[in-house]
Amino acid sequence: MPNIKDVAKKAGVGIATVSRVINDSGYVKKETREKVEKVIMEIEYVPNEIARSMTLQKNKIVAFILPNSTHLFFGELSYFVEQELFEHGYKLMICNSSEQIAKEIIYLEMLKNNRVDAVILLTNNDVESLIDKNRPVVSFDRRFEGVPYVASDNYKGGVMAAEKLLELGCKKFMFIGDDAQGDASSVITEVTNRRVGFNDCLNEHGVSDIVNIEYPLGDYIVSADYVRELMSEYKDVDGIFAISDAAAAAVIEEIELSGKRVPEDVKVIGFDGGRSFLNLGKKISSIGQSPELIAKAICSTILNLCNNKPVYDQIIPVYFFGGDTT
């Protein structure tokens, strides 16, 4: 297996020069850098990551703790985060917590033990006392004291959903979903603002009779049986805002199975960006959040933290995506 000495010999430079190229540390002339990089490719030299991390005193690894990477939006977000970090020489480690605080504790310990350089944290659990705030941590969709966070403008998204349903002539409104689950029911996250913005906007327009279903969704998916019960109990609801596209999908399917039509009888808006297709062939009208912009904001914060530069909280704009369900 080729080593760093082989690269140096073939490129006609010193080992220190090859090291500077590999670790992107110190000045190397453009022509020399290109020559070294060409040799590395030709002889298929693979740097020793352990040795590099010891030299740099960094692993160049960022852990992303999230509930479930199979969730459509979370999967997209992690994809763009990985792309953005890779361009800056970092690798991404996906840590599926399955909403279990015990797993989140283990993953947070990796940062304390220097096994990762930084953590991106997406959680509904009460973990504030477990976060080492002297180390690089960025929170997504959740505020922790002393920890920078990135979030979509969830409140504005709720307002936009209410305005759209009012514009379309809806008279009886429902919000379905709750980001707090299980033992974390007392935890308030930025996602809660979807409901708050929705209710505030309707109240400002003189609507006070709003059905708020704070159902613990678990991965933002609502059970078909529960939706069936809701539609049976609230037959006059004609405008629904769901906490996610996944929840909206379950709602739409059950509405149509009950004999009503979407959007003719009931209009439904989700939240994530209209990326969910139903087997019925509908594309969900949705409040869209941009995984690309969120990823850029998260990664810029991570890089600034790792390089001791100033950081600030970032709220990312949302938009209305007009699908087939409104």
Image (tube, rainbow, N blue to C red):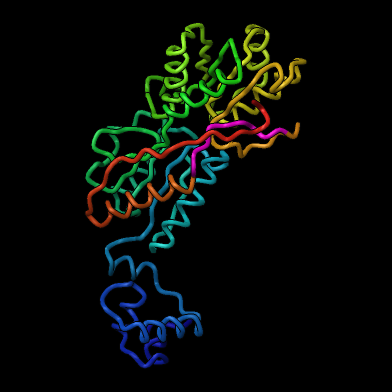
- The quarter of the picture where the C terminus appears is top right
Q: Look at the picture and state if 7 lies above or below 118.
A: below
Residue drawn at x 43%, y 81% as measured from the top left: 37
The part of the chain drawn in magenta is 282-290
Residue situated in front as seen by the camera: 311 or 173: 173
Residue situated in front as seen by the camera: 88 or 120: 88
Q: Estimate the x, y position of residue 61 in percent, counting from the top left.
A: 38, 57
| Left or right relative to 257: residue 245 | left
Residue drawn at x 68%, y 37% as measured from the top left: 277
Q: Can I make out residue 149 in this image?
A: yes
Q: Is residue 323 magenta?
A: no
Residue drawn at x 43%, y 28% as measured from the top left: 156
Q: Can I make out residue 102 in this image?
A: no
Residue drawn at x 40%, y 84% as measured from the top left: 36
Q: Estimate the x, y position of residue 49 in percent, counting from the top left.
A: 39, 68
Q: Look at the picture and state if 284 lies above or below 119.
A: above
